[in-house]
Amino acid sequence: MRLGIISALAEEQHGLLEALQSPAKHVHGMREYTTGKLWEIDAVCVLSRIGKVAAAMTAAILVEKFGVTHIIFTGVAGSGDKNVHVGDIVVAESLVQHDFDASPLFPKFEIPLTGLSSFATDVALTEKLADAAAPFTRVHRGLIASGDQFIGKLTQIQAVKAALPAVLAVEMEGAAVAQVCFELGIPFAVIRTISDNANDDAAVDFMHFIKTVASRYAFDVIRNFCKP
């Protein structure tokens, strides 16, 4: 296994770079990819930056230039369900682009030429990630929705939930990584710590959480995942 670990923001990956053994930095496409060993697993860590295009580009480069065989996206997300609370973790079983609509040419949410509106994560990686997260907080598994907008108003999350009732969390990158991995045949998983309730207080809650909690969760979960 050569594991690619993607996060959108530096705080979501804090501590992992320091944990890499024999790190080497490589700059490509305005991003810094750091290779090395994470608890005996060959790994490449990178920040994608925010949004679906940025995440898709990063995932493709990880595979095509750095030869990763598996990808994990770790970061934070807004809650998409009343039973999913700040501090909980959502491990994706599938991901959908909630802002994709090529109708009437294709059904809403369906990605043209794939026949799919959502992309399933790798079962083995998802199981292992959920087990790695379980000691730290409550873990949910299910649908995560991605879109190129920060969901920071109650009306926004209500609209997403009305269209996709099964959504547990909302973010801005995971479904793009999922599509790239599907098309390239790469096993992948997405894990998100809930930073806010995707409502009118989301922006303030997000910034506080990302600075105080997110990095600790990411480091501990990935450490549990990578250790034999």
Image (tube, helix red, strand yellow):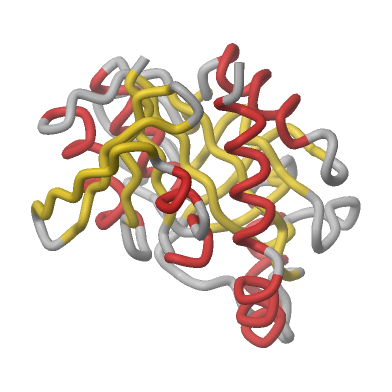
Vertical order, 201 against 45 (above or below):
below
Q: In percent of the image, x 58 and y 12: which residue is there?
A: 124
Vertical order, 55 against 128 (above or below):
below
Answer left or right for 116 relative to 223. left
Q: In percent of the image, x 26 and y 38: which residue is there?
A: 35
Vertical order, 138 against 179 (above or below):
below
Toward which corner of the image does residue 129 lie, by quadrant? top right
Answer left or right for 197 relative to 30. right
Q: Position of residue 68 (x, y in %)?
A: 27, 25
99 or 107: which is nearer to us? 99
Q: In percent of the image, x 65 and y 20: which residue is there?
A: 128
Q: Position of residue 48 (x, y in %)?
A: 31, 56
Toward which corner of the image does residue 27 lie, by quadrant? bottom left
Q: Quadrant of the N terminus?
A: top left
Q: Position of residue 200 (x, y in %)?
A: 71, 85
Q: Is residue 153 visible?
A: no
Q: Is residue 158 visible?
A: yes
178 or 71: which is nearer to us? 71
Q: Position of residue 178 (x, y in %)?
A: 40, 34
